[in-house]
Image: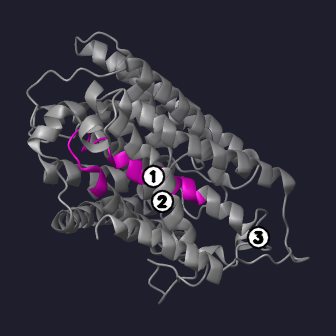
């Protein structure tokens, strides 16, 4: 029965596709599409998708050789599973008409099976709803993939699929609706998150910490952990940095000055963070390493994500440098505890996301984005920073405790940990019957 159930669900999807063939209405005269904006978001959507294979290389290079394929597949499979969920009902829950005025979930009927996504612009803007839906899909794809670094080398693949399905529906989608939908709770509150500091990185970071605590330490933790391929890590970092331009600059939803500014702040923060990580390691008496430079660059990308379209390029330097030092310190602290966050997802993504959120509350300015109602602490206004502090606490508690609950539920139906024998054998062979 367990073997039949997953395929049975796909059969249900096929039946639904026949029942709901989609809306193919032509664009109305009132639709104000802009060719340049459409072209840029099409490119951005492809760039963001590339980030997930990039993450696969980034994580895959860090684990031991016997777990490379399994770790990479955990990222890659999200492009399949999360896409199906998003198309069937995920986008509708995240961006459909708000239910009950609560600002936490959308109407599943709004865009069910991608209904009502053709022939109409997103929020009366310049790009089609279907394009916005596909752009946002790529954010949903990479978020659960980010979590995998925390429980690398010890999770059963089938259980992983169940967990990320629950995570997307119960954690990610409500946060996306609350943060980015015009009727969302955080949106109406005035919280700024340009491209996913809270929705993507904080949710993944706290879920990673919950996972590391719940699954406990690897059986072979006392062994020297030798990364399989540092070259994979470098390649993954390059792909992530490249794709992140779509992630952040694409979130401007148009080909204009705001997109250019977001692109500039993105690469500046990443570069500053990479050097900050390397120089901080040197201060601590360590040799400069490729791994350190790559981790630093990614931390900078994470931290600037919520701020990219709200801060100046000079402020991005501060975001990158400060976030890298703080994340590095948290990595040091974590290494002295019993928390086995295999690839330090919480110190890098969770802490990086929180630093970005707080620094957005410090440096956000109307000079970059006139649409914002309040400026940051640096400009003498306190309201935005206080709102970000409140949102940080709420999102952290929701993502952490919600993920712990989902891990427990998953474990009841399908054990999360591989056996000790399978762990020693390696997940590539024990879970997939494959070898590098």
The answer to whether the residue labelled 1 contacts the one labelled 2, judged by CB atoms less than 8 Å apart, is yes
Q: Are marks 1 and 3 in contact (CB under 8 Å)?
A: no
Identify the residue under disc 2: 82
Q: Which residue range is magenta in the image? A: 136-158
Pick whichever, 211 or 186, lies toward us.
211
Q: Residue at x 59, y 33 (%)?
A: 242
Q: Main secondary structure of the magenta part?
A: helix
Position of the N terminus by quadrant: bottom left
Total marks in image: 3
Q: Residues within 10 Å of mark 3 (few under 14, many from 20)?
A: many
Whole-number angstrom distance, CA of label 1 to CA of label 2: 5 Å
Pointer 1 or 3: first along the chain:
1
What label sits on residue 78 in the rendered view? 1
Q: Residues within 10 Å of mark 2 (few under 14, many from 20)?
A: many
Which residue occupies 30% across, 62% down? 399
Residue 133 place in picture, x, y as percent = 63, 64
* 3D distance between C-alphas at marks 2 and 3: 24 Å
Q: Secondary structure at mark 3?
A: loop
């Amino acid at each position: 029965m367990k073997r039949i159930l997953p395929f049975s669900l796909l059969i249900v999807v096929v039946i639904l596709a026949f029942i709901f063939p989609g809306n193919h209405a032509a664009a109305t005269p009132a639709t104000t599409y802009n060719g340049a904006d459409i072209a840029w978001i099409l490119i951005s959507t492809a760039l963001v998708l590339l980030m997930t294979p990039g993450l696969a290389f980034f994580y895959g290079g860090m684990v031991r050789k016997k777990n490379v394929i399994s770790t990479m597949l955990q990222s890659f499979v999200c492009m399949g599973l999360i896409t199906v969920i998003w198309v069937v009902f995920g986008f509708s829950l995240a961006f459909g008409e708000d239910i009950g005025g609560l600002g936490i979930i959308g109407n599943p009927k709004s865009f069910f099976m991608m209904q009502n996504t053709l022939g109409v612009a997103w929020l009366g803007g310049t790009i089609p709803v279907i394009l916005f839906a596909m752009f946002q899909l790529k954010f949903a794809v990479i978020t659960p993939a980010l979590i995998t670094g925390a429980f690398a080398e010890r999770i059963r693949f089938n259980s992983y699929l169940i967990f990320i399905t629950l995570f997307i529906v119960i954690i990610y989608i409500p946060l996306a609706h609350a943060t980015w939908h015009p009727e969302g709770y955080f949106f109406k509150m005035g919280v700024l998150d340009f491209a996913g500091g809270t929705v993507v990185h904080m949710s993944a970071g706290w879920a990673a910490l919950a996972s590391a605590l719940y699954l406990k330490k690897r059986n072979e933790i006392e062994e020297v952990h030798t990364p399989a391929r540092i070259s994979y890590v470098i390649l993954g970092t390059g792909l992530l940095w490249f794709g992140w331009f779509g992630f952040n600059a694409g979130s401007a939803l148009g080909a204009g000055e705001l997109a250019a500014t977001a692109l500039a702040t993105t690469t500046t923060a990443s570069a500053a963070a990479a050097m900050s990580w390397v120089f901080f390691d040197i201060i601590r008496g360590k040799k400069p390493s490729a791994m350190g430079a790559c981790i630093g660059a990614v931390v900078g990308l994470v931290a600037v994500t919520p701020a990219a379209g709200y801060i100046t390029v000079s402020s991005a330097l501060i975001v990158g440098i400060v976030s890298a030092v703080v994340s590095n310190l948290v990595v040091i602290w974590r290494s002295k505890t019993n928390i086995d966050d295999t690839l330090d997802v919480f110190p890098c993504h969770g802490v990086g996301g929180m630093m970005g959120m707080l620094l957005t509350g410090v440096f956000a300015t109307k000079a970059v984005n006139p649409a914002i109602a309040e400026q940051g602490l640096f400009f003498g206004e306190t309201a935005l920073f206080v709102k970000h502090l409140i949102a940080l606490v709420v999102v952290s508690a929701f993502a952490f405790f919600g993920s712990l609950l989902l891990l427990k539920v998953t474990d009841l139906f399908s054990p999360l940990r591989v056996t000790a024998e399978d762990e020693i054998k390696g997940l590539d062979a024990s879970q997939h019957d494959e070898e590098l």
